[in-house]
Image (cartoon, helix red, strand yellow):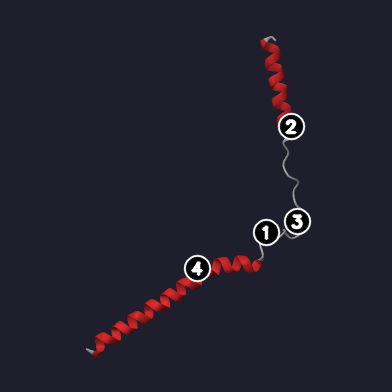
Amino acid sequence: MSRTIRVALTGLLLTSALGACRQPAPSDPELPPEPQAAHGDMRDAVQAPMARARAVQAAVDAAAQAREADVSTQ
């Protein structure tokens, strides 16, 4: 096969491959987007570390108050 034919076939294959690629159709702006996760699951996943941090902060505050009470009684 000559070089010209190979180059032409390669160009044709690349052009057809690029022609097959299309952008997805735009969604209808009137319709709301489909939910990807349940609202409760997402909320729980976000709030669980925050609740844990609040519990740790409460324990730290209680320990600090107990330490201050011990120091003040001495």
Q: Does dot 2 land on a helix, a strand or a loop?
A: helix
Dot label at residue 19: 2
Vertical relation: 57 (above or below) 31: below
Tell which circle, 1 or 4, labels the residue nearer the N-terminal end: 1
CA neighbours of label 4 inside 10 A, class few (<14), some (14 to 19), many (20+): few
Q: Which residue type does callout 1 highlight?
A: Gln
Query: How far apart in space, not on screen, are marks 3 and 2 (Cα)?
Result: 27 Å
Query: How far apart in space, not on screen, are marks 1 and 3 (Cα)?
Result: 18 Å
- Across and down, in percent, residue 59 comes to 40, 78
Q: Which residue type does callout 4 highlight?
A: Pro
Q: Does dot 3 land on a helix, a strand or a loop?
A: loop
For disc 1, the marked residue is 36
Q: Indicate left or right for 5 with 70 as reference.
A: right
- Across and down, in percent, residue 48 comes to 53, 69
Tell which circle, 1 or 2, labels the residue nearer the N-terminal end: 2
Q: Indicate left or right for 57 with 10 as reference.
A: left
- Across and down, in percent, residue 26 comes to 74, 48
Of badges 4 and 2, nearer the viewer stands 4
The image quarter containing residue 15 is top right
Is there CB contact under 8 Å for labels 1 and 3? no
Vertical relation: 45 (above or below) 16: below
Q: Quadrant of the N terminus?
A: top right
For disc 4, the marked residue is 49
Residue at horizontal 69 percent and vertical 20 percent from the top = 10
Query: How far apart in space, not on screen, are marks 4 and 2 (Cα)?
Result: 48 Å
Vertical relation: 35 (above or below) 48: above
Q: Which residue type does callout 3 highlight?
A: Pro
For disc 3, the marked residue is 29
